[in-house]
Amino acid sequence: MSLKFNYNVPTKIVFGKGSLDKLAKLKLPGKKALIVTGGTSTTRLGYIDRIKAHLDAREIGYEVYSKVQPNPTNVNVDEGAEIIKNTGCDFIIGIGGGSSIDSAKAMSMVASNEGKCWDFFTGVSKSKNKAIPVVAIPTTAGTGTEADQWFVITNETLNQKIGWGGDKFFPALSIVDPDLMMSVPPKYTAYQGFDAMFHSIEGYIAKTANPVTDLYALKAIELIGSNLPEAVKNGGNEDARAAVAMASTLSGMVEAISSTTSEHAMEHSLSAFHPELIHGAGLIMISVAYHSHFAPAVPERYIAMAKALGNENASDPMDFVSALKKLIDDCGVSDLKMSDFGIKESDFDELAENAMATGFSMLKADRAALSKEDIIKIYSESYK
Amino acid sequence: MSLKFNYNVPTKIVFGKGSLDKLAKLKLPGKKALIVTGGTSTTRLGYIDRIKAHLDAREIGYEVYSKVQPNPTNVNVDEGAEIIKNTGCDFIIGIGGGSSIDSAKAMSMVASNEGKCWDFFTGVSKSKNKAIPVVAIPTTAGTGTEADQWFVITNETLNQKIGWGGDKFFPALSIVDPDLMMSVPPKYTAYQGFDAMFHSIEGYIAKTANPVTDLYALKAIELIGSNLPEAVKNGGNEDARAAVAMASTLSGMVEAISSTTSEHAMEHSLSAFHPELIHGAGLIMISVAYHSHFAPAVPERYIAMAKALGNENASDPMDFVSALKKLIDDCGVSDLKMSDFGIKESDFDELAENAMATGFSMLKADRAALSKEDIIKIYSESYK
């Protein structure tokens, strides 16, 4: 074990059942909030009203931006940033799935500097100033964005999806209340839970892993392995929901310090060309072939992950792949097919080119170099 | 496992051999530093000159305060705060053992507000303002202050030693370079290493433990168990030094979020009355009787700690106590005697009263209530 690492997760995390109502007393980073949300389930389920009530009681002002799309766009970000600038909001509350929280982070960047959202990604504008603080309140357990410095924004005109970030975009405060996740449907619970687990799996096998992220990653893998099937089958099980939520937050911390690997790059390519494909589902589809390929590269780490998934006597790196397959089965998502999303085998060359080009930094985190041929092989083995 | 927790460790930690020289490029939180140190070994070993050279090269100004005492005093703090105010320093570098870093934190409090150091502890002055940022560079592996929000200051006139802190006193940046610890003598390496381990042990058995601190604590206990004897016997072993340093930093994170227990309160009482007794040595003296008392209260946690200390087949909470005894032996510190420090059995009543009064918050973290009689019994069983 090489004992060198950097650690930086400055977000204050308040985790647990009922923690949304800690908004009644928690120190908040400003006097007027822009509440950012997708505005459908968060409104319908009363979460937005509960937040407003807490802010009202504390005489903290707010505006609401509720037009965030599932793949949040630069237009969403610019609209929100405009409200912040015009109405004097001095902090942002992102509530919802990753899209709302990522938008809140991007709005922080745009509103605290000069320029439109996309100008920052092209280098025309720079994020020079102190960021407007963000409070993150996730209502799904998957992205981990509540505990990292990253955000992903889509430009629909250019058909580009870009990941961005920086230390100043860690949320100042994240309230992770598993109660808010109770009504996520089974299929999405599975997709999101696997997304969280792959953040930890990739962060654990990446070159960028360190002794602290290793602790988080193995714990998160263990929590997902022993709780995701139950959370999928019985969404009302509070303990299972809380365990999966904790795994997601820990996995965010893994992403914050370590890195995702080429698995994420390969999936981003799939869902960039096929936007109806949900990220977590895309990861599940390619995961068995992907990890069968990488297991020999870091055998002892795959054995440790197999143990985390409950195979205490694991001795072969492929034991992890067997445990992964079983978990996919147990969560009822083994029937996912690329062909159902319009992906063709003849696309693989282009998809591989795209994964290598746009996922460059993730491929750099791999412990064994992945060639274009390797990527095509993994896509092909995953195809059905 | 109750899945409720708060997490807040905003310090950026740069850990590893040679990391002191990252001062050449690391983002620093100001333009002029007050360098705070005890001024003996840190100067003799050239650490202060290396820091100055890096700051010179970057045209970052500095002043030096090098009069910090082993038990840092309010006078030290007021002198440093005065320099900060008079010379326009906008950040503080604390380099040395816990005393230098704790002093830097306390100077931050005093220099960013109105009042003298002791006025804050008595409530006459309040810490209202943003704290002046602190960079912590530990040269010992023990206190964990590089990763927590606490500091301990002594008033020699009043004969009081007070622990204080708050979230704004987390260091902004901590550089943990095990190279700086290579020359710590064996005896002190042992005392400090055990201090670190007891932060984790107590944080793990405390009511305040949470699933994240549990990860840190068990890892730190494992690292100390498998590396401290070697670091004591062969101080030149870089791997052993690094492992112990990492355990100390992780244990600081445990202290930051969980809490120490009555073990620390009982030791503070011993060393408050007998200042020549080194804190880590005091902890070692009482630890076997203390943990024999507490093991039945949280048996499964003691079994987990026994496993972390290398007894994979542990099944009885007292297996931990056996492993602890062995570690004390292996580190050559089993001959510590209270009587050598002038402690008398007839003092125990008064010492117990003191521990209960001044260590009130630590006793609250115990999972089983400790009576005055219990404390006297533990002192008595530890006496030789």
Image (cartoon, coloured by chain):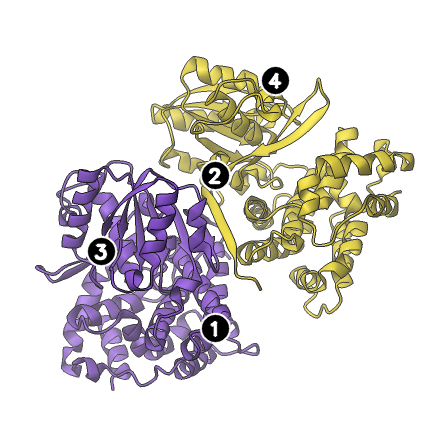
Chain colours: A yellow, B purple
- Look at mark 4 in the image and give the residue it sits on: A75
In three-dimensional space, the C-alpha distance between marks 4 and 2, rounded to whole angstroms, equals 27 Å
What element does badge 4 sit on? helix
Q: Nearer the viewer, mark 3 or mark 4?
A: 3
In three-dimensional space, the C-alpha distance between marks 2 and 3, rounded to whole angstroms, equals 42 Å
Amino acid of disc 2: Ile
Q: Give the residue drawn at x 38%, y 34%.
A: A24
In three-dimensional space, the C-alpha distance between marks 3 and 4, rounded to whole angstroms, equals 55 Å
Question: Horizontally, is A58 left or right of A321 in the view?
Answer: left
- Look at mark 1 in the image and give the residue it sits on: B237
Q: Nearer the viewer, mark 2 or mark 3?
A: 3
| Whether labels 2 and 1 share one chain | no
- Look at mark 3 in the image and give the residue it sits on: B66
Q: Height in image: A349 above or below A68? A: below
Q: Residue A380: x, y in percent? A: 88, 44
In three-dimensional space, the C-alpha distance between marks 1 and 3, rounded to whole angstroms, equals 29 Å
Question: Horizontally, is B79 left or right of A241 in the view?
Answer: left
Q: Give the residue drawn at x 87%, y 43%.
A: A383
In three-dimensional space, the C-alpha distance between marks 1 and 4, rounded to whole angstroms, equals 57 Å
What element does badge 1 sit on? loop
Q: Height in image: B309 above or below B253? A: below
Mark 2 or mark 4, which is nearer the start of the sequence? 4
In three-dimensional space, the C-alpha distance between marks 2 and 1, rounded to whole angstroms, equals 43 Å
Give the quadrant of the C terminus of chain A. Answer: top right
Q: Residues within 10 Å of mark 1 (few under 14, many from 20)?
A: some
